[in-house]
Amino acid sequence: MRSPHGALRRAAVIANPVKFPDVDLLRHQLTQVCREHGWDDPWWALTTVEDPGGTQTERALEAGCDLVVPVGGDGTVRAVASSLIGTDVPLGLVPGGTGNLLARNLDLPVHSRREALAVAITGRDRRIDVGQVRAWEEDGTLHEEHFLVMAGVGMDAAVMEATDAEVKRRMGWLAYLGSAVRLSGDQPVVAGIRLDDEELVTRKVRSVVFGNVGRVQGGMPVLPDALVDDGRLDTAIVAPRGITGWPGVAASMLTRGSLGGQNATYHQGDRVDVRLAEPTPAQVDGDPLGRVTRMAARVLPGALTVRVRSDH
Ligand SMILES: [Mg+2]
């Protein structure tokens, strides 16, 4: 297939070599799929610890690639997607590592790299929302990050930080909310939470999770109403059982009962600002951000183009 300029279309593949014992085999497999669909051999780059995908994506855009495909874990997808925001170049999702959570939420193939790349080449473009967080450590250090699946502060992030890779692989993001709480003896933290322009409410919480999509590994809906393209951010506030009520914002919230022995309340909006009484672990798409005393999230509606199945 040729681009409007007459050249063969070309995908960029940005792979995390830590996830693949045989990178040459991976390259061979993906090159074959491109050729089968009449595309040029892929532009190719590997991630490093210092550069998990952002710079490689910028180089792929400069090279005029028609599609950018991260192949690694959710962290690689996040890094590549962050650099595609604001462009019309689509993200192609090919499974690698654990998670593949955005792909699962978009009903994309997660067991076959060949099938997934074929969808990325032949599918249609769909615009989805992206989450943006700003998080401050106690010393004022600011982290600015994007997320595609979920970000959060509290026990969920503490488990992500503490859990070894094998446990994380087995539990996946089920560690996220209820399971996370059960594993930990830590106390809840006092948080001041502002949802959109509602008044600030102070509450003891286990975690606050911001979601761009609703499902985690195993299909468990953490945020049952979250949609990836509704221009809204879904927030789950998980608090110890027994502390109920949400003065001031009760009308805008929907209580869905308990989760993992906790009370969980849900909110949809454009942005959330959480201030914490003590440094508390934070994460974005499963990557630890360190301990923060404030974390603010907002939605960037339709900020990213993703290739999905043509019949979806
Ligand atoms: Mg949404």
Image (cartoon, rainbow, N blue to C red):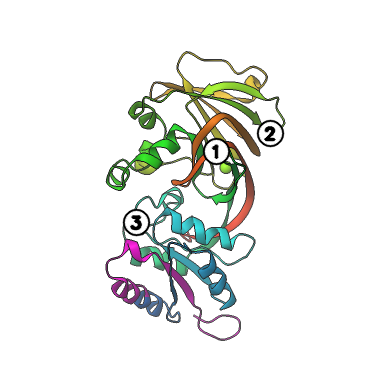
Q: Residue furthest front?
A: 139
- Judged from the image, the secondary structure of the residue bearing numbered disc 1 is strand
How packed mark 3 is, by other alpha carbons closer than 10 Å (few <14, some 14-19, many 20 or more), is: some
Ligand 1 within 8 Å, label 1 CB = no
Q: Nearer the viewer, mark 1 or mark 2?
A: 1
Choose top left, top right, bottom left or bottom right for residue 295: top right
Question: What residue would you read off at disc 1?
Answer: 292
Q: Earlier in the sequence, mark 1 or mark 2?
A: 2
Mark number for residue 97? 3
How packed mark 2 is, by other alpha carbons closer than 10 Å (few <14, some 14-19, many 20 or more), is: some
Mark number for residue 198? none
Relative image position of residue 65 (x, y in whole percent):
54, 75
Q: Which residues are magenta?
A: 1-30
In which of the image's four quarters is ligand 1 placed?
top right
- Judged from the image, the secondary structure of the residue bearing numbered disc 2 is loop
Q: Is residue 222 visible?
A: yes
Residue drawn at the location 44% of the way across and 38% of the way down:
157
Mark number for residue 196? 2
Q: What whole-number distance in Å separates the C-alpha atoms at marks 1 and 2?
A: 20 Å
Q: Is residue 269 visible?
A: no
Tell me: residue 286, above or below residue 123: above
Residue drawn at the location 64% of the way across and 49% of the way down:
301
Task: Out of 13 and 312, give the one closest to the viewer.
Answer: 13
Q: Earlier in the sequence, mark 3 or mark 1?
A: 3
Residue 245 covered by magenta stretch: no
- Amino acid type at image mark 2: Asp
